[in-house]
Image (cartoon, rainbow, N blue to C red):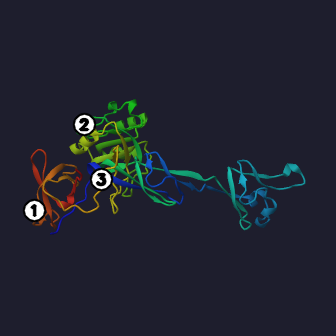
């Protein structure tokens, strides 16, 4: 029997996730399989090459490039401090002496008798890769990184910006349809992940940044406020590298949209616990969802993330509509007609019937919904 499978957002109380933590270039792994790690534990380290600074000594000394070696004070691979003499001439009259000093602290990378240039390189920058989540090292990838595993509660969002961070989960509102207002934020929320309800304004985001809130999780936001926050329009590329002062995760979409009751209830149940969050989002091939991971304390459960596909859409499945004019509305599948139906574009597509909490129903193309997965 054929099945229609629609990927959706995971909202589940208990699952096991694995996250690969990989260096951008070869380095050294600092942990072993079985080690317990925290979100801020350094699990791998690499050295990023320092910036190269060129100087044309031949021009500054007024000599031919092939004569440069006769004037060098520092040779290739020598260490230099800022303002050390790199090269100098030796005039008969000392007042005409020219000294070329280093503008940086670093090493002499190379000297060219073809161009008359010397290349200096700044010291390497140490890059430490953090664990991101509290968990256990499940696998080690030599010189590259590790895989961290944890048993947790998992909530996936529909869109986010900002990188990985972690902090205590706190509720900024009491109901999922309540907007998060500036006055609901206070200094005690510094370093924490604050959960809102239906909406987040530009003023609230400014207040969160001022207080040092590390993460905001909310149902919706106006696209104009997001544009004002970033200073530009987001394209279709992956997000997650934005520097706005906090990580933002939308669970429902753009506009004033109450957070799904199931999502709000799960987050409320874990208020006061530590959460790791990431705003990284990719909506094209290789979908990446923003996420809130709340590690569970105690021994790892036997529950594993299901790798197989669901057995299609079932009656009663909770779904979210992801196309206008009902974008963001949540209901349950109440009918699965087998016949194709014509839509306004005159195409014939598979559809399903969705019943909303108020008892109303609608028929939508199956491609216009996503299943809200999880127990």
Residue for point 86% across, 55% down: 90
Q: Where does residue 220 sit, x and y in percent of width and height? A: 28, 44
- In the rendered structure, the answer to whether residue 284 lies left or right of residue 361 reads right
Determine whether 4 is above or below 226 in the image: below
x, y percent for residue 328: 22, 49
Left or right side of 1 for 225: right
Q: Residues within 10 Å of mark 3 (few under 14, many from 20)?
A: few
What's the residue at 28%, 58% (across, down)? 306
Whole-percent x and y of residue 234?
Answer: 38, 53
Question: In the rendered image, which residue does mark 1 sit on?
Answer: 337
Quarter of the picture holding the N terminus: bottom left
Q: CA distance from mark 1 to mark 3?
A: 37 Å
Q: Secondary structure at mark 2?
A: loop
How far across and how far down the image is residue 27, in percent? 54, 58
Q: Are marks 1 and 3 in contact (CB under 8 Å)?
A: no
Label 2: how many Cα within 10 Å (few below 14, some 14–19, many 20+)? many
Q: Which residue is mark 2?
A: 178
Give the secondary structure at mark 3: loop
Q: What residue is disc 3 on?
A: 302
Q: Is residue 340 visible?
A: yes
**Circles 1 and 2 in contact, beta carbons < 8 Å:** no
């Amino acid at each position: 029997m054929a099945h229609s499978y629609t990927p959706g957002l995971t909202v589940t109380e208990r699952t096991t996730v694995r996250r690969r933590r990989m260096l951008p270039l070869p380095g050294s792994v600092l942990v072993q399989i079985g080690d317990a790690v925290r979100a801020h534990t350094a699990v791998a380290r690499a050295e990023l090459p320092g910036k190269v600074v060129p100087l044309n000594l031949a021009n500054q000394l007024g000599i031919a490039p092939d004569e440069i070696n006769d004037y060098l004070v520092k040779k290739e691979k020598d260490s230099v401090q800022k303002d050390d003499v790199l090269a100098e001439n030796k005039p008969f009259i000392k007042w005409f002496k020219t000294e070329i000093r280093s503008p940086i602290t670093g090493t002499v990378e190379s000297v060219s008798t073809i161009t008359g240039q010397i290349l200096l390189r700044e010291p390497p920058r140490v890059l430490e890769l953090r664990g991101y989540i509290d968990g256990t090292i499940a696998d080690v990838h030599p010189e590259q990184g590790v895989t961290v595993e944890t048993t947790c509660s998992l909530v996936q969002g529909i869109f986010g910006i900002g990188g990985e961070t972690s902090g205590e989960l706190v509720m900024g509102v009491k109901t999922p349809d309540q907007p998060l207002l500036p006055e609901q934020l206070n200094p005690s929320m510094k370093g924490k992940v604050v959960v809102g309800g239906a909406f987040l304004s530009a003023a609230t985001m400014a207040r969160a940044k001022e207080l040092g809130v590390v993460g905001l999780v909310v149902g919706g936001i106006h696209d104009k406020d997001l544009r004002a926050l970033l200073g530009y329009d987001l394209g279709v590329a992956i997000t997650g590298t934005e520097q706005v002062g906090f990580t933002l995760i939308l669970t429902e979409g753009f506009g004033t949209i109450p957070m799904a009751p199931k999502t709000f209830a799960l987050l409320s149940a874990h208020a006061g616990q530590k959460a790791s969050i990431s705003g990284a989002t990719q909506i094209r091939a290789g979908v990446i969802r923003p996420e809130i991971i709340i590690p569970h304390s105690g021994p790892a459960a036997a529950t594993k993330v299901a790798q197989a596909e669901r057995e299609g859409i079932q009656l009663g499945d909770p779904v979210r509509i992801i196309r206008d004019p009902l974008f963001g509305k949540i209901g349950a599948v109440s009918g699965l007609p087998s016949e194709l139906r014509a839509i306004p574009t005159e195409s014939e597509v598979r559809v399903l019937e969705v019943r909303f909490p108020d008892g109303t129903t609608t028929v939508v193309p199956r491609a216009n919904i996503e299943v809200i997965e999880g127990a």
